[in-house]
Structure formats: structure tokens, C-alpha cells
Image (spheres, rainbow, N blue to C red):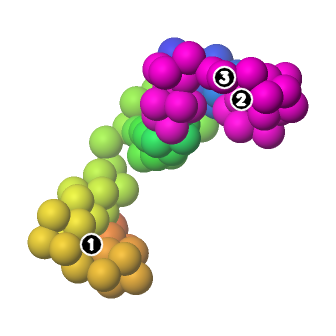
Amino acid sequence: MTATLAWASVAGLVLVTLLLKAFGPVVAAGRRLPGWFPGFVGLLTPALLAMLVVTQLLGSPDGNVVLDARLAGLAAAVVAWRLKVPTLWIVVIAAAATALTRLIS
């Protein structure tokens, strides 16, 4: 996947999310939505965030997949999150893990 294609996908998902969340109530105009629709819309935001995280974590300017210190930061953040550490500390732990990994390598 090239960087252009990845960013085009991100832009497309942003557009779809905006259309569904902002203009959905206007288009529906009091009609009842199908039962599956609110769940679908609720899943778009985490999917978009996951896509942004993956492209920023594993992407490089030339479009190749890169495994570097950012992966260690994400791993530290996931461990801290699973241990129910407060969000601010998760960010600090992830940044520290990334910085330490860059210092070592």
C-alpha cells in the first residue's frame, strides 16, 4: 500500500464518518433508523482511529512498513492500559519507552 493510497483511505473514512455523524440526522428527518445502524456508526470512529495509529506507527515516507522504536512505545502503552494506569501516565510511559528504545538502538 502506497502512502498516497493510505492517506486517500484515511480521507475517505473521515468523509464517510463526517457524513454519517453530522448529516445523518438531517437526512433521516425523524425516520427510524435500522437497528444495526447506530452500532455501525459507533464502530466507525474506533476503526478510523485504529487506521490512523497503524499508518503512523508502521508507515514511512516512502510507503514501506517500518518496525522501529514506535512499536515499543505502543507495546508499553498497551501494557499500561491493561494494568488500568491513568491515561496521562499511559502517554508518559509510551513516550518514555519510545525514547529509551531510540536511545539504545
Which label's residue is closer to the chain start, 1 or 2? 2
Residue 97, numbered label: 1
Between the C-alphas of marks 3 and 1, the distance is: 48 Å
| Residue 20 point in image, percent of width and height | 71, 29
Q: Select label 1 or label 2 by which is in front.
A: 2
Callout 3 amino acid: Arg
Image-based side of 70 in relation to 7, left or right: left
Q: Residue at x 84, y 27 (%)?
A: 29
Q: Is residue 93 visible?
A: yes
Residue position marked by numbered label 2 in the rendering: 20
Between the C-alphas of marks 1 and 2, the distance is: 37 Å
Q: Residue at x 51, y 37 (%)?
A: 42
Eyeballing the image, is 15 above or below 70? above
Q: Which image quarter: residue 21?
A: top right
Callout 2 amino acid: Leu
Q: Select label 2 or label 3 by which is in front.
A: 3
Q: Look at the image and give the residue range highlighted in magenta.
A: 16-43
Between the C-alphas of marks 2 and 3, the distance is: 15 Å
Residue 32, numbered label: 3
